[in-house]
Image: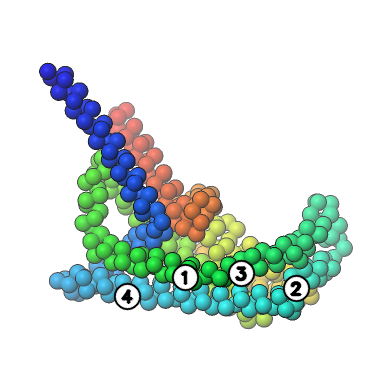
Amino acid sequence: MVSDGRGARASGYWAFLVVLTGVSLAFAAILLPYFAAILWAVIVAILFEPAYRRLLAAMPARRNGAALLTLLMILAIVVLPAALLTVALINEAASVYQRIQSGSLDPEQILVAFESAIPAWLSDALDRLGIGNLAAAKDMFGGGAAAGVRAVLGQALSIGQGVFDLFIKLMVMLYLAFFLIRDGEAIEKRVGAAIPLQADHLQLLVDRFIVVVRATIKGSIVVAILQGLIGGVVLWALGIEAALLWGVLMGAASLLPAVGTGLVWVPMALYLFLSGSIWQGVVLVFCGLFVIGMVDNVVRPVLVGRETRIPDYVVLITTLGGLQLFGLHGIVIGPVIAAMFIAVWDIAATMRTQAAA
């Protein structure tokens, strides 16, 4: 009878585990279309939690009011500037496209001028390396790129649906962020109680997750914004067209360790030198090395602190992998998964050491 009772309990346990897994997967499938909104709601809740705590200390009996004021801060600091930048970027991209369509800006002619400006010795060296033939690049700029731009902008008929979908996800993100900010501590305790991990191990993972999210946003996104802003201003001062577009590209490139903004300004400086704009090229190189480049070395340690950083080679690989798998959201997801991986193996090593002792 005892063994029958244990068998019944075991079968009941496994049956419940199957039901639990199935329901959880179904719940995840329902949430999947709003994965980005949920992710960024969690991120902004983590980032603005200290501000909420300060507001709550000033109005201890008004949790809703403190959370609402925090949400207004998110709108003013994050959402509104991002919306204004997006509108300006779309306008500038449309202007560039119109110039390409009218023929006043011909990418193929720019590449031809670039090729003709290359000195003979450099052209010979490129030929010996097997990269001197620019015919394929001219084909891409002359036909492929233009066709690609037309295909992208040809989706303008469906832009209303895209804007509406983005608006809905933004509203979901803000709505969820309000409750995560207000009830984040209680939600963390309930989730922690349901996860079958030791309390100290779970707390280590939660702490590591929060630290990495804050470090990624403050140490990467903020630095990217600063570098893109400085780079755009420098390009605008040098009279380079579409400075806003190039500045945004520079900010995006700065998210990649080791290479960073050099992916944008180095080829641009090379083009300026070869096209005869020597002083502009010199200014761009100086600003790239000693102004734009130094932002990462000066600002990031102040915002993040050395003790929270993941090795740069791990950040590079996981950021690229995250971008490949999750798109723009991979900028955060990749390093967070890397941090969780390192934390879990640190726990495993500690447990093994304790068991051996």
Q: How far apart in space, not on screen, are marks 1 and 2 (Cα)? A: 31 Å
Instruction: Determine if residue 31 is in view.
Output: yes
Q: Residue furthest left?
A: 1
At x 49%, y 71%, the residue is 160
Q: Residue at x 41, y 70 (%)?
A: 167
Q: What is the distance, in whole Å, between disc 4 and disc 1 at their CAs?
A: 22 Å
Mark 3 belongs to which amino acid?
Answer: Leu
Graded by Cα atoms within 10 Å as few (under 14), some (14 to 19) or many (20 or more), the crowding at tag 4 reads some
Label for residue 153?
3
Cα gap from disc 4 to disc 2, whole angstroms:
45 Å
Q: Which mark is residue 163?
A: 1
Q: Amino acid at mark 2?
A: Asp
Q: How many marks?
A: 4
Tag on residue 72?
4
Q: CA distance from mark 1 to mark 3?
A: 15 Å
Q: Quadrant of residue 119?
A: bottom right
For the residue marked with disc 1, what is the amino acid?
Val
Determine whether the residue tagged by mark 4 lies in a helix, strand or loop.
helix
